[in-house]
Amino acid sequence: MNHASKCILSTQCKLANSESCNAHCPHFIALHGLNGVSGRVATAGTPRDYRLVTASNSPARAEQASVYRAVDAYIKTFERQFDAEGERIKSLYLFSESPGTGKTTTASVLLNEWLIAHYIGSLRLGLQPLQQPAYFLDVNNWQTLYNEFNRNNIPREIAETASREYYKQMKYAKTAPFVVFDDLGIRDASQPFKADLHSVINHRVTNKMPSVYTSNLPITEMEFVFDKRLYDRVRDFCLVILFDGESNRGMRR
Ligand SMILES: Nc1ncnc2c1ncn2[C@@H]1O[C@H](COP(=O)(O)OP(=O)(O)O)[C@@H](O)[C@H]1O
Ligand SMILES: [Mg+2]
């Protein structure tokens, strides 16, 4: 069966739509795994609904034309990931006040385009592609995990499971070359949680690792939601992109 519509490599793959375009293709397996359980797209942790979105098929492109001009230009800088001496790759802050304007969709587009650039670029250079070139951190969910093992009277097993998952996600968010921080700063955060978030972002900025943040708050609010230190770090070498328009949530297109 033709797998072109199920594979994020298809727009750049010579085998797309040929007889070799099937579930046994080694490149399809490298990205999408066997039966969708492993593979770099799944281990990146992007929510299921956003696993196949790319720059060319993004549902947000038509309505957010000016955003996607910036997105296209930004994606072109991804080739610099192989050039240690090259110009630093910027971070992006995707912002709109109202939900449902395509921020998470677009952040996932960028993550998938990074996976494509990393995988194809590695093969071209004769390098082994990394197992986890990119990671999607759902900041809300990460904060929920934190709260789960820091509440009083929580059964030990539950607390241990939450804590293990929390620190695993923290490690991936520190080490993956490209990370999406989805929904930054929408809830009250405790001091120790802020310190963890700061340490992750600080590590990335110090090591010039690019991140994409999405938020319902203007970047200037980060100073008050978190603190000045984190605000300075998030702003470091970061381009802000505004999404306007009404919510598209729940609309079928
Ligand atoms: N500009 C758009 N045009 C069409 N559909 C869109 C657009 N933006 C978002 N969507 C759809 O709306 C839903 C919510 O989008 P999402 O990216 O999660 O929004 P946000 O993160 O800004 O709250 C998704 O199903 C997405 O495909
Ligand atoms: Mg969102």
Image (cartoon, grey):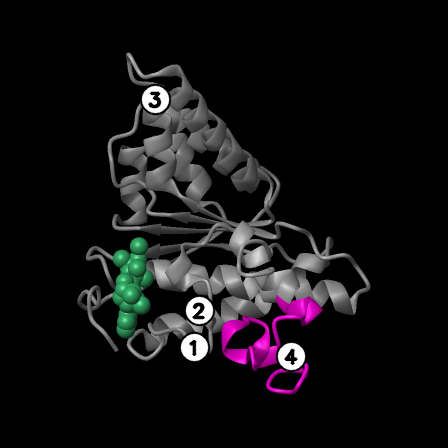
- Under 8 Å from ligand 1: the CB of mark 2? yes
**Residue 182 image offset from top left, x and y in percent:** 38, 49
Which of labels 3 and 4 is toward the front? 4
Residue corresponding to mark 3: 191
What separation in Å lies between label 1 and label 3 (alpha carbons)? 40 Å
| CB-based contact (under 8 Å), mark 4 and mark 1 | no
Q: Which mark is residue 13?
A: 4
Most foreground residue, 112 or 61:
112
> Is 21 left, or right, of 45 in this rendering?
right
Judging from the image, what secondary structure is the residue with disc 2 in? loop
Secondary-structure class at tag 3: helix
Q: Amino acid at mark 1?
A: Asn
Residue tagged by mark 2? 53
Q: Earlier in the sequence, mark 4 or mark 1?
A: 4
Left or right: 126, with 88 as reference point:
right
- Gap in angstroms between the C-alphas marked 4 and 1: 16 Å
Whether residue 251 is situated above or below residue 84 in the rendered picture: below
Start-end of magenta stretch: 1-28
